[in-house]
Image (cartoon, rainbow, N blue to C red):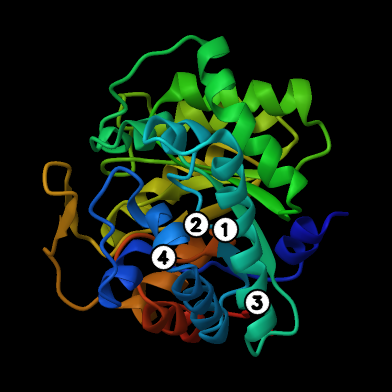
């Protein structure tokens, strides 16, 4: 049994929260095509400290700052391929250092693999409106996946995937080339019923039941009120662990590359037990959530690890 599987078998796993919004609080400009990954160049020590803060708040798992850190993203803007790979290495190392610096004795590092839509840097992870062949999707994702594996992440985080064809290409890539690697797959959904490209969430989840490398499946970066409906569409269609990590309920503006706040306080103490009772095994936060939110999730979690 792998380390990731061991964690998921022994209790609810708590994920970390937003990275970009925590960087913004530190006056780091992430309004660019690299988004939070730009901090790997601008201020890596802040990335390390944010990881530490999440572990200190009770998170079991840190997601590396590689959501938008694709080799092509960096080389398109004039960096060398070597430098691009070094930045991915740095992202993993900073997550590991954050764990070392924290009050945690142990924890998990998940290597973030954002969708092709994130590379487009136009908000396409919230539309799924892009079309590549399976070969092209795999050619795009392979370099970052290989490097994250080489850097020793505990699990690949195939996250915020809005496009069913892209998800299938990733699943087949794992089967064909990475048979011993653990991953979780988390879809981007508008309301918990469908992926953004229109595919029914229930259909998408069911498709991956036979892909053994994917150990957990679920949704992320949707509003908290969409999580319970999503879980109800997931549970009948999988025997895998179920992962959910909502954003804070804000709306993303791809023109300004900023989030527009549309919510009051999130009642984690009410929501989290409902998600657990419905079947969620891995719970955390996504964009605009903070270490305080993760601490609240920990406090609200029934039979949490620790």
Q: CA distance from mark 4 to mark 1?
A: 19 Å
Q: Which residue is mark 2?
A: 65
Disc 4 crowd rating (10 Å Cα; few below 14, some 14-19, many 20+) is many
In the picture shown, does residue 45 fall above or below 287? below
Secondary structure beneath label 2 = loop
Q: CA distance from mark 2 to mark 4?
A: 14 Å
Disc 4 versus disc 1: nearer the observer: 1
Q: Which residue is mark 3?
A: 99
Q: CA distance from mark 1 to mark 3?
A: 13 Å
Mark linked to residue 285: 4
Percent x, y of residue 245: 43, 59
Mark 2: few, some, or many residues within 10 Å (few <14, many ≥20)?
A: many
Based on the displayed image, in which of its 4 quarters is residue 171 positioned? top right
Under tag 1, what secondary structure? helix
Label located before the other in sequence (3 or 4): 3
- Asked whether the residues under the numbered discs 3 and 4 touch, taking CB atoms below 8 Å apart as contact, a structural biologist would say no
Q: Determine the secondary structure under disc 3.
A: helix
Q: Are marks 1 and 2 in contact (CB under 8 Å)?
A: yes
Identify the image quadrant of residue 143.
top right
Foreground of the two, 240 or 105: 105
CA gap between label 3 and label 4 equals: 18 Å
* Of pointers 2 and 4, the one earlier in the residue sequence: 2
Mark before the other along the chain sequence, 4 or 1: 1
Residue at the (65%, 31%) spot, across then down: 209
């Amino acid at each position: 049994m792998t380390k990731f599987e061991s964690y998921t078998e022994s209790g609810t796993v708590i994920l970390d929260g937003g990275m970009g919004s925590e960087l913004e609080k530190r006056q780091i400009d992430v309004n660019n095509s690299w988004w939070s990954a730009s901090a790997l160049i601008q201020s890596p020590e802040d990335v390390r400290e944010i990881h530490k803060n999440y572990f200190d708040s009770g998170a079991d798992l840190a997601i590396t700052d590689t959501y938008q850190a694709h080799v092509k993203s960096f080389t398109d803007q004039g960096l060398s391929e070597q430098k691009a790979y070094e930045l991915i290495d740095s992202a993993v190392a900073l997550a590991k250092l954050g764990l070392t610096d924290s009050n945690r004795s142990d924890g998990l590092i998940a290597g973030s693999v954002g969708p092709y839509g994130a590379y487009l840097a136009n908000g396409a992870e919230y539309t799924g409106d892009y079309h590549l062949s399976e070969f092209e999707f795999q050619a795009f994702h392979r370099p970052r996946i290989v490097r994250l594996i080489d850097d020793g992440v505990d699990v690949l985080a195939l996250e915020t995937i809005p496009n069913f064809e892209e998800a299938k290409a990733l699943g087949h890539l794992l089967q064909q080339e990475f048979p011993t690697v653990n991953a979780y797959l988390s879809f981007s959904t508008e309301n918990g019923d469908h992926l953004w490209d229109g595919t029914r969430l229930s259909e998408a989840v069911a498709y991956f039941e036979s892909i053994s490398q994917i150990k957990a499946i679920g949704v992320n970066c949707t509003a908290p009120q969409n999580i319970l409906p999503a879980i109800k569409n997931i549970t009948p269609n999988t025997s895998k662990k179920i992962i959910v990590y909502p954003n804070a309920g804000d709306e993303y503006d791809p023109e300004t590359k900023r989030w527009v706040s549309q919510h009051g306080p999130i009642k984690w103490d009410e929501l989290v037990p409902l998600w657990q009772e419905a079947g969620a095994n891995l719970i955390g936060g996504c964009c605009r959530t903070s270490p305080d939110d993760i601490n609240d999730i920990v406090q609200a979690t029934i039979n949490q690890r620790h």
